[in-house]
Amino acid sequence: MDQLPVTLTVNGKRYQRSVDPRRLLSDFLRHDLGLTGTHVGCEHGVCGMCTVLFNGQTVRSCLMFAVQAEDAELTTVESLGTPNNMHPLQEAFWAKHGLQCGFCTPAMLLTAKELLDNNPTPTREEICEAMSANLCRCTGYQTIVDAVESAALAMQGGAQ
Amino acid sequence: MNGAPPVKTHPTSMRWIGQNMKRVEDPRLLTGRGKYIDDMSVPNMAHAAVLRSPHAHARIVSIDATRARALPGVLLVMTGAEAAEQTGPLPCFSSPATTQYCIALDRVRHVGEAVVAVVAESRYIAEDAIDLIEVEYELLPPVVNPLDALTSSGDAVLHPERGPNNIALQRTLTFGSYAEDMAGAELIVRRKVVWPRSGGQPMETVGAIATYDEGNGKFTIHANTSMYNYVGWLIAVSLKVSASKLNLVPTIAGGSFGSKLFAHKVPVLAATLARACGQPVKFLEDRLDNMMSCDNHGSDRIYDLELGLMRDGTMVAFGMKVIDDYGAYLQFGVGHHGNAAAQLTGPYRIKSAQIDLTAVFTNKCQQGAYRGFGSEVNNFALERIVDAAAEELGMSPVEIRRKNFIQPDQFPYKIPTGNVYDSGNYEAVLDKALEMADYDGWRVRQAEALKQGRYIGIGLVSCQERSVFSSTEFWFWNHDPGFALTSSPESVNVRIDPTGKAFVSLYAPFWGNSPETMATQIVAEQLTMDPSDIEIIYADTDQGLMGTGPGGSRYTVMIAGAIGGATLELRQKMFKIAGHLMEANESDLELQNGRVSVRGTDRGMSIPEIAMQAHFFRLNLPDGINSGLDARYTYDHPYTTQPSADRTDLGVFYPIMGHMCHIPIIEVDIETGRIEYLKYVAVHDCGTVVNPMTLAGHVRGGTAQGIGSTMYEQFYYDEQGQLVTANFGDYLIPTLREVPPNIEVGHVETKSPFTEYGIKGGGEGGRMGVPPALAAAIEDALRPFGVKVDGLPITPVKIRELIRAAS
Amino acid sequence: MKPAPFHYVRPASVGEALSALAEHGEDAKILAGGQSLIAMMNLRLVRPSALIDINWLSDLGYIQHQNGALAIGALTRQSAVEASPEVAEACPLIAEAIRYVAHKPIRNRGTIGGNLAHADPTSELPAVAIALDAIFTVQGPAGRRTIAADDFFVGMLSTALQPDELLVEVRFPACAPDQGWSFMEISPRAGDYALVAVAATLQVQAGLCTAARLVYTGVSDRATRVTAAEQALVGQPANEASFRQAAELAARAVDPSSDFHATAEYRRDLVRALTRRALLQALARCQKGA
């Protein structure tokens, strides 16, 4: 099968590429665009490591082909911040020890972002519901929930 | 105590140790800029994929890869026979070794074993090529049930060169006057428990990028493995090159839990392929590769246990007959039973013990290291039988434990196996847990609930968490010890540059533990520097001295010792230089806030000032001092001794002994068998805690993994040896919803007398205690039905079966 | 694991999609949400020769409440259904069930039509469709036809859809104001496929059950209605005792199989427990509505 053109925006930057139709979106982002912050854990849609935002919504990039992202706006973890200028979610995960190995962290951050974008004042239960979409093998999840809770407050301008 | 190191005095107040410092590792991980192995690439890199055996046991008759080789984009197809021409057997810690190749040579011994490797321009094409390869197998009888392995013969024997059956090792070790003590016991309680294999299954699999430089005949391998002390040169041996012709470069790992301790298959395969195809090769396991053929399947045991006691509840002797299903090959020998022997008798004053061990081969993936390395299983066995004894004697689970605890004034305490526990205060941990859990209050609530037809259960366990393994555990079980390793050091290099920045080289990887943070806090403490002036680097094996890495909860203790040694040297040199330059006696100097000052005056020199002198102004320095400010220190295990020749005393091999008490309070829905957590308390004593926040992370994360092994996870093989749970849809890793929403963590700190700062390891965390705690809670909830939990995983299906059987 | 190669087609209309289906034959697959399909393709369990990507047929994505029914276009994303106030009002059973479908990221891509056409025997929506007497509209070369829900599901991963047909809409009658509903599920972990789930509706008048629907997933090769249990409720007082009886009947009526995750006996246990609990919840909702 010949390569197909795909044009999409990732983290606000426009890309035009040619890809095999079977090129997974996860591989495309990581290896064709060099955005390796999105990770791969299972390639059968269970673990959530490959989560990105697709037009603002979480999706599992291992369950999409790159060609399906035509005209879409994708957000990956690289857009949230840099070590010297972190997003409040990243600050909160850091302060609350919401990561150990870091492999699920990009997925967790983007999942939290989707939640807070749609619901800036979530209850702890709503946070648990959202965050339960991704596996974490290191933390036991509790400090992840603490981090999202703390970030929500910070982003509302409240105290921690 | 023989061989014991001198007791250390520990500082009473500390600036950095004990702080919940935010982790040094995090900023790059949070921003998606961590470089895991699959994030890396080298120019001209090709990709490998592996064709894996669909059969549990078979001879490889023929391989036709013609169509695969012809597929555009395919660079190389390699069979086991072709690989064996240039690469020898894989490294193996057991004695006698099992012969295993990175690509199976003439026989496959488990579903998923590598049969053919393909290198192509992309992983996609490599997998297309695999589809085009035809392999002819001659099926051999699969051995799946470990009890069948005991009597296997003929074609069912996996390693005929070792003997006529599938028994890998059979040996009984007796410690103390076991038979006598059992004969004198007023009550003998017996229980059979079954612990099936589960595994670490970190979110990141094992991967390697191997480059062979034909210019200098040298391999460079990037891989997410650990154990640089061993793995570098052992891989070189497999590759049939000199150890000086292999440089292993660590990459950060997305979790390990033991599974990347000694990752050798993947690097050996990648290097073999790179050398053969003339291009760098990346081999990254995908999830299926990893589940079927990693080295991290955990212990897989059937126990017949007996505990001898007196009627008043005093425990006397503990014995077991254990069959352990090691799978198709051995990796760490039966070291998992060595490990268990470190804390065989738990926190109790049991006088004697016996282990009758039979290790068998079956057609399954081999066992490796999984958080606990066999001790978590012993904890399960011991705590289950202690609970059984309490029930038979009509004692509460709290009472029987309290009665038998080793008392604080009895430490260092030698247990029957010969290992020593350095220190402990088990009642303090128990009491704290009871208080945090409101244990008595919950007993009342439990009784009330039962009247309303609700089944609440309270579990309680007191478990040891040994830390800092010694290498003797790998071989003292062997009839012929083989390579009777006694070193397990950790080294560090601390260099202060001319501007006063400290560069700390670690010879161990990052796995999700916090080596950079630990090292930073400890160096900051020792040199009174600010953490922001400390830079952590990971050395490769070319530069490395000795590094055993994280494993057996050893890393923080060992790096503290190594840093202690290196920074002492640096302090001494700085004092010499500063004393000379300030014309002061070294005995009048002190190091505070990054400055060497003359006590009682305001004269002093900052570390950067001293460093500048040390690097550039030789003629200002005193005689006998070289330029520079650099120290390398190798810290050996602080307390380890040889086992006796007859193995009635295994020596001291795991003396830095932590302890935990877990109290889960659950409710069982008896109609569906599902459980809900009402409360979860975990109190851990890991001595001095460098960073309470990161330790709590290991407690909670370990608890989640323990819940996985107890209730959800199993590598399950059917009668044909097919791995039924071979993907994440069937192998059930707990999500957020399966873990208690609030694991309340308590700390007790009983310092070690033998380690720097009195630190004990705590990385294996909650997994060491959760399984028996949950089993006890479920049994407790279902006590009205007389249900007994003797096997894992204890799923809702099983709970319903047990209730139905009892009704 | 990476998928095997395939021919990729992106039709601009339903007509083009049907032509592509006809052209590529039985080995072609429709790509809608892809949440089941791509996972299987990655594992190389399925290797379609062609993928017909209908994600650009935006005309097939809609939720319309018209003439006492909720018409949902086949390409409507599950998360849109989950968030829809029309669905919550007209067919709350759907809104409740859809939260059990995997996790949000899956629902953000997965479509109503794709889920129903896939017909996994442990899937939630087929049971809901049967419980609500949904009507499926499919389009083929000869035009459109409608199929009743119970006739749409044939067996394991198998529906009445012909290889050259496309599911275009599912229409759910709006639930009556005095109708109670409940969807309950037990799965091994949160978000997993159901071991057993029940879609229940109940109507009560003067304290007696007048109508009930009990449709189960996980007990057979397709979603299954247990009419014996439904009929046993009619005329009975709407209380725990009747519900317990119906639950027992249902547990005995089903003939589930055993697999690695659950025994047949356990699935019956779940039928028994979930039926009673769902009916109690449906009753509470009747009473609220009344």
Image: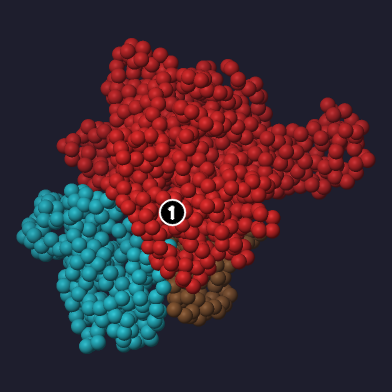
Chain colours: A brown, B red, C cyan
Please name whichever residue, C207 or B344, is drawn nearer the observer in this view of the structure. B344
| Residue under the image location 14 percent in, 56 percent down | C254
| Residue under the image location 43 percent in, 54 percent down | B114
Q: Would you place residue C152 above or below residue B566 in this image?
A: below
> Does dot 1 land on a helix, a strand or a loop?
strand
Q: Residue furthest left?
A: C235
Percent x, y of residue B561? 65, 33
| Residue under the image location 55 percent in, 67 percent down | A31
Question: Where is the N terminus of chain A found, in terms of image quarters?
Answer: bottom left
Residue C112's image quarter? bottom left
| Residue under the image location 50 percent in, 23 percent down | B650
Q: Would you place residue B288 above or below residue B628 in this image?
A: below
Residue picked out by circle 1: B114
Going by the numbered disc 1, the residue's amino acid type is Ala
Please name whichever residue, B393 or B74, is drawn nearer the observer in this view of the structure. B74
Q: Residue furthest right?
A: B619
Relative placement, left or right, of B562 versus B459 is: right
Percent x, y of residue B345? 42, 24
**Count of marks placed on residues:** 1
Residue C173's image quarter? bottom left
Residue B785 seen in this snapshot: yes
Q: Specify the subunit that label 1 lies on.
A: B
Relative placement, left or right, of C156 versus B307 is: left
Residue B661 seen in this snapshot: no
Residue A84's image quarter? bottom right
